[in-house]
Amino acid sequence: MELDRAILRRTDRSDEEIVINFGPQHPSTHGVINFVTQTNGEVIRRSVPDIGYLHRGLEKIGELVPYPGYMPFTDRIDYLAAMFTNEGYAQAVERLLGVEVPLRANYIRAIAGELCRISNHFISIGSMSQDIGASTPFTHALRERESVNNLLEELCGARLTFNCHRIGGVAYDLPAGWGDKVLRFLDHLDSYIQEWDRLISFNEIYVERLANVGVITREKAIDFGLVGPNLRGSGVKWDIRRDMPYGAYPDFEFNIPVGTGRVGTVGDCWDRYYVRVQEIVESSKIVRQALAKLPEGEIAAKVPRKVKPEAGEAVGRVESARGDMLYYVVSDGSEKAYRLRVRTGSFMAMGIVEELSHGVMVADLIAIIASLDVVAPEIDR
Amino acid sequence: MTQEEICTQLKAQFGEAIAALSETKGDRFVVVKGEKIVDVCRFLKTTTGLEFDYCLDITAVDWPARKIIEVVFHLYSFAHRHGLVLKVETDREVPSIATVESVWKAATWLEREIYDLFGVNFTGHSDLRRILLPDDWVGYPLRKDYQEAGGYHGIGNERPDPLVQLSKVTDEKRKAIAAAVAAAAPAIVPAPPLGTSGPTPPPPTPLAPLAPSTATTTATATATTTAPVAAPAPGPERKG
């Protein structure tokens, strides 16, 4: 009797809207984020991201430590793609100082960066399949990522928080014999990606779950300021590496994968996912070219121990794994930045979640969040 | 289009509201009068040949000496591959400018962040709430004169130095600590058990002597009173 009444109560309420806190600790929110979700049964009316749980005041810290001392902090902005956070900061300060980075340093930055992109994208596509409900690909992705992390560890001694770049260059030259190891890994990787496609990318269930879900049109993507694979997934061919070339990137040939609506609509979750898979292949191409052309020379420009740029301001922009990353540094002529601003891809991506959430199923919200590839510390900084 | 050309076109349209392109080192910028910012942004976005469709970033810089907060717009055009930095100066006491949400949706979250960390009020904004910090946070942390509050809902922003508690405490130091604690808070600390105890003194374990004082005062107080006394020994400082 008691049970019957309980069931009756539940069925009575089936038309009622409820508010669920989806997070802050939830395996598929990719970090500590809360999605305050208003649902009617399985259908979401709207979902509002509540962020800030990992706010560490990294912009304020930038005003408190001298320029070179901030480099390790940049690792913590995006721990999955720390090479780019290093590079963006270094680039902004170099532009303020007017320092020319040696060519070899730029090549090492490109090699390290692209390996880091491979590592990051494996986490992204692996955890995405995990969120959708396929567990096996995640273990495969982590296995490949471990290999990259081993290589990066050999390069700079750290697996995630690299602190590898310096203002004016890089901290470490390539270890002896390292290039061959990288090439061996890339040979494996290129064949592995085909296996990955067979395993999951074109898996019918997976495609059914992602195609036509969370469609972001080209106009909307630009309007919301999306960057990186999220923007390219909507068919916008925009990549800082090609369109505003920096470092060694003008020397390399590579394609910019964009979403084409291959299995559904342009800009759906599958497109964003597949852009990342293709970018792994492109990164592999870049690393091969960089290793083949690697010039001799210095790995860092001569930068005074006390970095004191003239008063002024500069922007450093790099194509991070999560897209166009912007550092805005204002100098007042002292040893510390007067203002240090980090605009990250994840922050912009979170801004569109509410817009996409209207009328989707709860399970699709998870697919949308996974496809945007947000990293909580990068949102909150 | 070069920045000079864009600036000339803006000046032709808005005249006085647009200052000249700055001559600063690094990136150059244009200062726009606050009341015109929405018009300027819409003009930049919709005019053929300019088409700034990409709002790269909106942020702010606090200048207490000049008594202003600058709101900085980084704009870019995908179609024409040119960029521009706009700045709006607003009074530091009552910082307020109109929202550009109607021009770029990206502004919604970027402006919320400025509101949160600088306290700039964006008039007409659809959802002006704190974004990174809790709703009941006091102050705007990225302002230059921001003073940290002592804590937040009982969560302190300091903690006792764990190294001090782990360091060896000799008999002499223990007496000094007891004396210091007694002197610091005579009302709360009852008769110190050390030195006045019965026939056998307690075995000198490193952590034991701190226990009684921890029980009477807070852990923080113990650590802070301990620190100066233990200082002569090679500093048990926290790793820098």
Image (spheres, coloured by chain):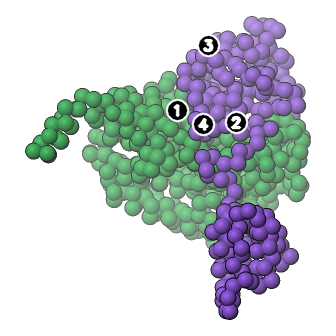
Chain colours: A green, B purple
Q: Amino acid at mark 4?
A: Asp
Report helix, strand or loop for mark 4: loop
Check if mark 3's residue and mark 1's residue have beta carbons within 8 Å.
no
Question: On the image, numbered disc 4 is attached to which residue?
Answer: B136
Report helix, strand or loop for mark 1: loop
Q: Residues within 10 Å of mark 2 (few under 14, many from 20)?
A: some
State which quadrant residue A153 falls in.
Answer: bottom right
Residue under the point 70% across and 70% down: B190
3D distance between C-alphas at marks 2 and 1? 24 Å
Residue under the point 51% across and 29% down: A221
Report helix, strand or loop for mark 3: helix
Residue under the point 46% across and 57% down: A190
Give the label, 2 or 1, closer to the camera.
2
- Residue B234 position in % (x across, y down): 83, 77
- Residue B131 position in % (x across, y down): 58, 35
Question: On the image, numbered disc 1 is attached to which residue?
Answer: A351
Q: Going from the N terminus, do you reach mark 3 or mark 4 first? A: 3
Q: Residues within 10 Å of mark 4 (few under 14, many from 20)?
A: few
The quarter in which the N terminus of chain A is drawn is: top left
Q: Is residue B45 visible?
A: no
Q: Going from the N terminus, do you reach mark 3 or mark 2 first? A: 3
Discs 4, 1: same chain: no
Q: Amino acid at mark 3?
A: Thr
Give the label, 3 or 4, closer to the camera.
4
Q: Amino acid at mark 1?
A: Gly
3D distance between C-alphas at marks 4 and 1? 22 Å
Q: Chain of mark 4?
A: B
